[in-house]
Amino acid sequence: MVDDVDAHHAGVRDAGAVIVYEPTDMPYGVREYCVRDLDDRLWAFMTTLG
């Protein structure tokens, strides 16, 4: 969980991370995006909606 998923995404994108999917409002109540790290591990970052 992060305080501001869009700001977090912008910083990660600007640092050159491989974005798997852009920030998206999910039906389960979070806004999240997903990236891969240098070891090809998948990470999801999110903020609670509402």
Image (spheres, grey):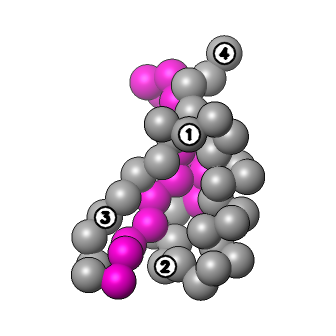
Q: Amino acid at mark 3?
A: Leu
From which residue to which does the magenta span run? Answer: 22-38
Dot 4 or dot 1: first in sequence order is 1
> Is residue 12 depicted above or below 26 in this figure?
below
Q: Using residue 16 as the reference point, say whether residue 6 is left or right of it.
A: right
Q: Which residue occupies the foreground of this view, 29 or 45?
A: 45
Residue 39 visible in the snapshot: yes
Q: Nearer the viewer, mark 3 or mark 1?
A: 1
The residues tagged by marks 2 and 1 sit, at their Cα atoms, a distance apart of: 19 Å
- Residue assigned mark 4: 50
- Marks 4 and 3 close (CB-CB < 8 Å): no
Residue 29 appears at what percent x and percent y?
51, 22
The residues tagged by marks 4 and 3 sit, at their Cα atoms, a distance apart of: 26 Å
Dot 2 or dot 3: first in sequence order is 2
- Residue assigned mark 1: 2
- Residue assigned mark 3: 42
- Residue assigned mark 2: 18
> Is residue 20 depicted above or below 7 in this figure?
below
Q: Nearer the viewer, mark 4 or mark 1?
A: 1
Prevailing secondary structure of the magenta residues: strand
Q: Which residue occupies the foreground of this view, 39 or 28?
A: 39
Dot 2 or dot 1: first in sequence order is 1
Image point 48% across, 36% down: which residue? 1
Dot 4 or dot 2: first in sequence order is 2
Q: Amino acid at mark 1?
A: Val
